[in-house]
Image (tube, rainbow, N blue to C red):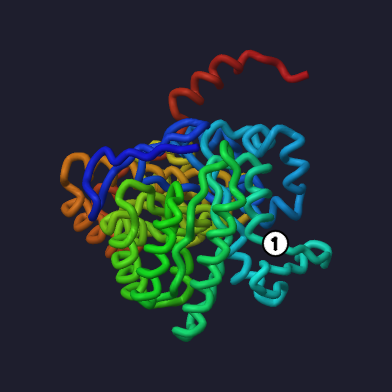
């Protein structure tokens, strides 16, 4: 099971916490990279540990189909299978209700999926989703929910919310003592009264934590954060709050301001593979010709291994040449950026400076790529860092055989 302690801040507004699991503790707010198939794309577990990642998310639906939850269990559980030492949260498969709409059928019993791999049929019930996550060996499991696409009617959002509540009760009843901690998921679209009713009903079931699902699926940002604010007000202050599937750095800062503790998103690694890199002063599109002779790292002063060793010019060359290594280098930087952002937010909260941090952060992001600050223009060149230079020196006398 898990424990959660608020260490700075209060019941509302930005706060810091400590989430303790059977595989270690993480400080919150925390960002979890997405490891859909038991792997964060383009990165090794060693890369994740080196670059401050404390907790990851894995996908129940995909691991259930391949290699199979029973196979993972037989091999010692997901932590051993992927050689990951830290906490793991598994989603329930509820998002696939939305993303695989053409391949599934909903009923009160559960979700009947047609596998996107071989066309075979699989019934995922709340009880089955809970069992799969238990056998995977997750530290935190999610109750099966119904996520619907925007735009939707109030009637559709209400029906999805009511089914989500029914499934949450069944997940709670089927969860065994000593199994993963179980989080309930709040649904209800962008309708405040539905979100409030769902949050209050889930709180009565006494879950270990509570997630906000069904946001960031097409609604306006103003509606997103208005919904987050209203929902947080109805959740138990002593439990962790998790905003699922979002988002951009701006999303994280705005949601932390409203009291969210946990996040996941594919954005840092997906953007990395598409050549978009995050910095404190906005995004860099590495294929841009202006970087062809740029000897600076992605972000001067960044502590990631990519910025310590490689220039923008080199990364651009790799990206245009479609060299596989660039996906790892870019992903390492983006993941480190996200982890560093969370660390800076935690520090600001502890020092009661979050409002000032938020204001400065958002001002910096208004810069465009062609308007980098002078500090970056005069930044250092990338090159071999001291640890790598030492390794090269130690091995320079070895002869090839």
In x, y percent, where is residue 237? Answer: 30, 51
In x, y percent, where is residue 206? Answer: 43, 51
| In this picture, residue 356 sits left or right of residue 6 | left
In this rendering, the answer to whether 142 lies above or below 121 is above
Residue depicted at 36% across the width and 71% down the height: 224
Residue depicted at 59% across the width and 47% down the height: 175
In this rendering, the answer to whether 178 lies above or below 270 is above
In x, y percent, where is residue 128? Answer: 68, 55
Between 52 and 197, the one nearer to me in the picture: 197
In this rendering, the answer to whether 21 lies above or below 274 is above
Work out whether residue 284 can be spotted. no
Work out whether residue 38 can be spotted. yes
| In this picture, residue 66 sits left or right of residue 173 | right
Q: Secondary structure at mark 1?
A: strand
| In this picture, residue 92 sits left or right of residue 17 | right
Residue depicted at 52% across the width and 54% down the height: 272
- Local crowd size for mark 1, using a 10 Å CA cut-off: few (<14), some (14–19), many (≥20): many
In this rendering, the answer to whether 272 lies above or below 155 is above
Q: Quadrant of residue 296?
A: top left
Residue depicted at 17% across the width and 40% down the height: 351
Q: How many marks?
A: 1
- Residue named by callout 1: 124
Quadrant of the frame with the C terminus: top right
Between 158 and 152, the one nearer to me in the picture: 158
Between 221 and 248, the one nearer to me in the picture: 221
In x, y percent, where is residue 299? Answer: 37, 46
């Amino acid at each position: 099971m898990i424990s959660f302690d608020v260490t700075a801040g209060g019941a509302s507004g930005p706060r810091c916490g400590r989430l303790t699991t059977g595989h270690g503790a993480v400080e919150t707010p925390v960002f979890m990279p997405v490891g859909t198939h038991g792997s964060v794309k383009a990165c090794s577990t060693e890369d994740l540990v080196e670059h401050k990642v404390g907790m990851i998310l894995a996908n129940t639906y995909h691991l259930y189909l391949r290699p199979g939850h029973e196979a993972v269990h037989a091999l010692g559980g997901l932590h051993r299978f992927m050689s990951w030492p830290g906490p793991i949260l598994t989603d329930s498969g509820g998002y696939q209700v939305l993303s695989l709409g053409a391949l599934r059928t909903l009923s009160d019993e559960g979700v009947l999926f047609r596998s996107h791999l071989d066309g075979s049929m699989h019934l995922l019930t709340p009880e089955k989703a809970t069992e799969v996550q238990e056998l995977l060996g997750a530290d935190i499991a999610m109750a099966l929910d119904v996520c619907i696409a925007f735009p939707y009617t109030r009637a559709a959002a209400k029906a999805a919310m009511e089914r989500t509540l029914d499934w949450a009760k069944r997940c709670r009843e089927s969860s065994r003592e000593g199994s993963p901690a179980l989080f309930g998921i709040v649904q209800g679209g962008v309708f405040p009264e539905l979100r409030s009713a769902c949050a209050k009903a889930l709180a009565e079931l006494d879950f270990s934590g509570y997630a906000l699902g069904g946001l960031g699926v097409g609604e306006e940002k103003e509606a997103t954060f208005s919904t987050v604010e209203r929902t947080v007000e109805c959740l138990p202050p002593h439990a962790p709050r998790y905003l699922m599937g979002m988002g951009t750095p701006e999303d994280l800062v705005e949601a932390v301001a409203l009291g969210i503790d946990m996040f996941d998103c594919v954005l840092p690694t997906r953007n990395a593979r598409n050549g978009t890199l995050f910095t404190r002063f906005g995004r860099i599109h590495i294929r841009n010709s202006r970087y062809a002779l740029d000897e600076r790292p992605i972000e001067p002063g960044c502590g990631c291994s990519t910025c310590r060793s490689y220039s923008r010019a080199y990364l651009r060359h790799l990206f245009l040449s479609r060299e596989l290594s660039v996906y790892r280098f870019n992903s390492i930087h983006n993941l480190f950026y996200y982890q560093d952002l969370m660390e800076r937010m935690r520090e600001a909260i502890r020092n009661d400076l979050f409002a000032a941090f938020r204001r400065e952060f958002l001002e910096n992001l208004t810069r465009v790529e062609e308007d980098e600050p002078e500090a970056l223009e005069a930044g250092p060149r990338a090159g071999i860092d001291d640890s790598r230079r030492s390794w090269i020196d130690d091995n320079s006398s070895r002869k090839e055989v």
